[in-house]
Image: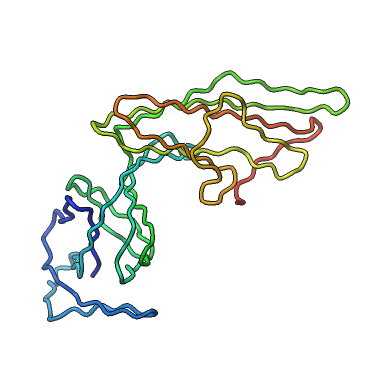
Amino acid sequence: TGQRLRGRGQTSAPQTEEAPRITAESFATDFVAEYRIPGRISIGADRQARVYPISEEEFEPELVARAVMSAGPDARLEATFAYDGEVPINAGRVQLYRDRAYVGAAALPLLLPGAEARVPFGVDERIRIAVRDERTESGSRGVANRQAFDERRRRYEITSYHSMALPIEIIDRVPVPMDSGVEVAVLEGATPPTVRDLDGKTGVYLWRFDGTPMQTETIRHYYSVRYPSDRMLAATEGGN
């Protein structure tokens, strides 16, 4: 059994045999949530998987295309919504439908009343992101205390081929120095991010724009790293 989530104006009816619709009664306290299903139902012995929804929830989702550049230049469509129900929805797998077509399944975390949810719907083929590396400089400066420097200049050109505006988010990062002798600086001409330190993660930037159809947006991601020339830099993952 499971719950069925859908946005208003869309249907999540599976392509296979339609299971009987059951309306369950929910009972909840501050510590326990129960569903009581009235009556009985017969299940065939043909070993075929079946889904029997016990309730249905409708939400007003906001669609957004998000690209995490460290993972690749692909924008992925996501639906975000606020859960305003009174009974928590248990964690589990949900079936995903886009324009009434089944696109796969995803894991949904426990949704508490008032929680924000984000559900992925796969790569958005109508958004193209071109990555262009620009001319950079590197070397060392100074006489007594020589400092090595390394620049990174990368330009992202994002174009939406949708017929309507769809918000687009681009996520990238800058190095976070773990040593007092290392300095990271944003270079002149860089595009200011909409959000710095996204979700409390130091050095993670998010740029957001409206995604006007057939309009190319440009993000200039420029930064430099300076460090003592007698040291070697090592990149590590993790931290906040």
Closest to the observer, 217 or 78:
217
Mark count: 0
Where is residue 133 shown, x and y percent of the image? 53, 23
| 170 lies above or below 100 | above
Q: Is 196 situated left or right of 142 in this image?
A: left
| 1 lies above or below 170 | below
- Of all residues shown, which one is farthest toward the right? 144
Q: Is 188 situated left or right of 104 in this image?
A: right
Quadrant in which the N terminus appears: bottom left
| 6 lies above or below 139 | below
Q: Is 141 situated left or right of 234 in this image?
A: right
Residue at image position (50%, 42%) is 195
Where is residue 58 shown, x and y percent of the image? 22, 59
Closest to the observer, 162 or 149:
162
Residue at image position (20%, 70%) is 54
Residue at image position (11%, 60%) is 17
| 172 lies above or below 240 | above
Where is residue 34 shown, x and y percent of the image? 29, 79
Coloring applied to the structure: rainbow
Where is residue 22 shown, x and y percent of the image? 14, 71
- Of all residues shown, which one is farthest toward the top? 135
Within the image, what quadrant is residue 139 found in?
Answer: top right
Closest to the observer, 138 or 216:
216
Closest to the observer, 222 or 86:
86
Within the image, what quadrant is residue 91 found in?
Answer: bottom left
Residue at image position (34%, 42%) is 64
